[in-house]
Image (spheres, grey):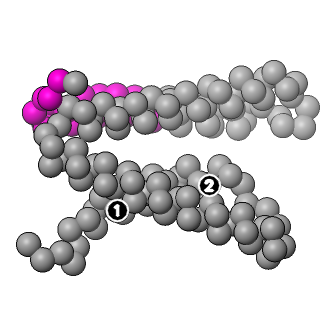
Amino acid sequence: MSQRGFRTAKRRYHYLFWPLMGVYTVLVFATSFLVDTNTAPTWLKITSALAVTLPLFGVLYAMRRQTEETDEYTRMRQLQAMRDGGLITAACAFLVGFLQIFEVLDFISVFWFGPLFFISYGLSFCTQNFGKVV
């Protein structure tokens, strides 16, 4: 694990993050328009799902790499935010699961737990020091 300056780590993160988000966006729109879920063969659906998911793996790798390349304080803040985002996402997954078991909710796609993680991670990072006495 090589520690780099915050600016270098942030620049390396952005050089990986933005192209991956561009590829992800193009693939989401392309597969949405080109793959008909009613008539497309299963192999094409699986290939499309994998293709759309691969850039997200790259983003998660970029997040991991950024935490490794920064100082201890920045690393701690990032990992705490990821922890909190994961806890919020897991709690919501349990809640939705139980609401479905008790037939309060019919169906919620598991897809939405991915964006929920990133939203809760981002909000956790932004609000970490809110309300703390320094």
Query: Could you tell me which residue is drawn at 21 percent across and 78 percent down?
Result: 131
Q: Residues within 10 Å of mark 2 (few under 14, many from 20)?
A: few
Quarter where residue 119 is shown: bottom left
Q: Is residue 131 left or right of residue 31?
A: left
Report the amino acid beneath label 1. Answer: Ser
Q: Is residue 26 visible?
A: no
Q: Which residue is mark 1?
A: 124
Residue 4 is situated, as x and y percent measured from the top left of the image, at: 13, 29
Which residue occupies the foreground of this view, 98 or 39?
98
Query: Any magenta on residue 12?
Result: yes
Q: Residue at x 87, y 24 (%)?
A: 41
Q: Which quadrant of the figure has residue 3?
A: top left
- Identify which residue is drawn at 36% across, 63% down: 123
From this view, report whether residue 76 is shown above or below residue 26.
Answer: below
- Is label 2 or label 1 in front? 1
For label 2, the SS is helix
Q: Find residue 84 and report its horizontal and vertical position in percent.
A: 40, 59
The kind of residue tagged 2 is Trp
| Image quarter hosting the N terminus | top left
Q: Which mark is residue 58?
A: none
Please tell me how crowded label 1 is: few (under 14), some (14-19), or many (20+) other residues with Cα within 10 Å. Answer: many
**Residue 10 image offset from top left, x and y in percent:** 21, 36
Indicate the position of residue 47 as horizontal and vertical percent values.
71, 23
Which region is colored magenta? 2-22
Give the left or right position of residue 22, taking residue 27 as reference.
left
The kind of secondary structure the magenta stretch mainly shows is helix
- Is residue 60 a member of the stretch shown in magenta? no
Distance of label 2 from label 1 (alpha carbons)? 18 Å
Circle 1 SS class: helix
Query: Which residue position holds label 2?
Result: 112
